[in-house]
Image: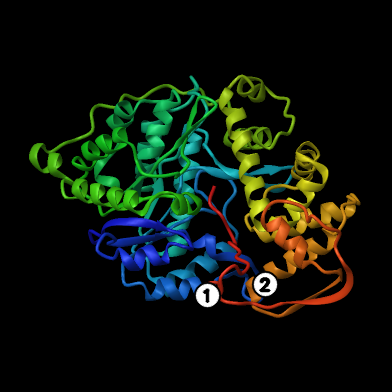
Amino acid sequence: MNELGIGLVYFQGFENFLASHSSLIDVVEIEPQTFWYDKNDECDAFKYDADVMSFLGSYDRPKLFHGVGYPIGGTCIPPAQHFNTLRQQVNELKPQWISEHLSFNMFNDAGREINSGFLLPPLQTAEGVKIAAANIRHYQDEMGLPFAFETGANYLKPRKNEIPDGLFVRKVAEEADCHILLDLHNILVNQRNGRQSIREFLKCLPYERVIELHVGGGIYYKDYYLDAHSGPSDAELFSILEEVAGKLPNLKALMFEIDPESFTKVPQAAIRNQLNTMRQIWDKRGYYHRKRKMKPANCPEQCVNEAINVSDWEYTLGKMVLGKVVDNALSKELIHDKGIAIIKDMVFNFRGSVLISTLKFSTRLLRLSVGEALFNTYVNEFFDTAAPELLPIVAAEQFSAYIKSNQIAVPYLGKVLEYELASIHTAIDKQKRTVNFDFDPAPLFAALQCARMPSEPLVAKALNLQVVFENPETTAGTFTFNPVVHN
């Protein structure tokens, strides 16, 4: 593989920055599932945004694929349409390699696969190693590309009957004979939250397998440090990055992760400074290895109690973070782990943010009409009856059905929901739609845009509103829709 250099994990909205900072960007990393918006039953795949793919195809930099939909740490394997879609995108964009998370986000509940809505830590036992390695080999067979797995953030406290973090990563990489994407910010998150220290983690790391590094920024929440992709890296992470990069003989790419919302708030000068600092460190890659022939320190084996199997771990942890009652020995252990509450909060907030951003006007109207407390009750009830979904359009349609089935009587809400769902579908398929109103919705939308209710009663009138696709690059203020979001 070629040495690619410094890059940015791409999201829609980054196009202007990429165009105006070409000297800072050597490579771009793409999360392909973020462009998926619906199932394509005609060819057993997902539909994805052709305009985004066209832009990326024209962007003159090497590309990497980083999966965010089907991690490799669990027992539920991706469906055929997942690989069918990935192969289509690979054929269009020709990524150098593909990576996925050493996590799980699906669990089996009475024969039904449930999405937990979050990337959860795998069970760190010998069985967990074998399952992850088998999934990696499956990915490699399906995709025909070099594969790397990402080291994850784990908000749970260390368990006495698990393989330590660094040793688990090493065992998976050796069992699967694959590469590693070392997310240094995730390892710093784990250290700050009381898991294995970075120094102990690195003792076990097989340096020669690390081909890619991720860095980013985080935030504190209820005494926990979160991998929030919220801004530039801090001084401690840069110090760690400089030390680690110097020890890696096969490093090919160093990537900066920042989420789209933070990207709009962080000054571009700060992002430029981040990339420039990364380049200075990149130039020192492999220095200590070449000079001293660096090798990982001795990483002793540890006896692990295999009493818990992977399926039970996934079922118990998945149910608990979704707020479901589980009565078994593992749940009685995990209920005392404060990290469970943190993950539950993140699952709820992530699902809520997807719902609110997808149905902006409808959720604002409901919240302003019934108040914050009752609004949260409705959202909690909806989340309790509907499992998380990969595609936000599915969650939007489910929430609309929940509002109708529970006969929530809020004036104008039904028509606003109908309009927003029509807008989503038009954003997807570019087909014109008509929504028939019995009132003039313009004052209502103008008020909701400012997060308030109209000051005057709405005028009753028959009005047929056409929903037409317009390119958001040329039309200010048009409806925008992100098909899949990364948590």
Mark drawn on residue 324: none
Between the C-alphas of marks 1 and 2, the distance is 17 Å
Element at label 1: helix
- Judged from this view, the residue extending furthest toward the front is 456
- The location of residue 147, given as percent across then percent down, is 38, 55
Residue under pointer 2 = 41
Q: Nearer the viewer, residue 436 or 299?
A: 436
Give the amino acid type for the residue marked by disc 1 in the picture. Answer: Ala
- The location of residue 391, given as percent across then percent down, is 64, 58
Residue under pointer 1 = 50
Q: Quadrant of the N terminus?
A: bottom left
- The location of residue 369, given as percent across then percent down, is 82, 47
Q: Earlier in the sequence, mark 1 or mark 2?
A: 2
Task: Report the residue at 19% width, 48% height from top.
Answer: 280
Q: Compared to 75, does 45 lie above or below?
A: below
- Judged from this view, the residue extending furthest toward the bottom is 432
Tally the numbered discs: 2
- Judged from this view, the residue extending furthest toward the left is 291
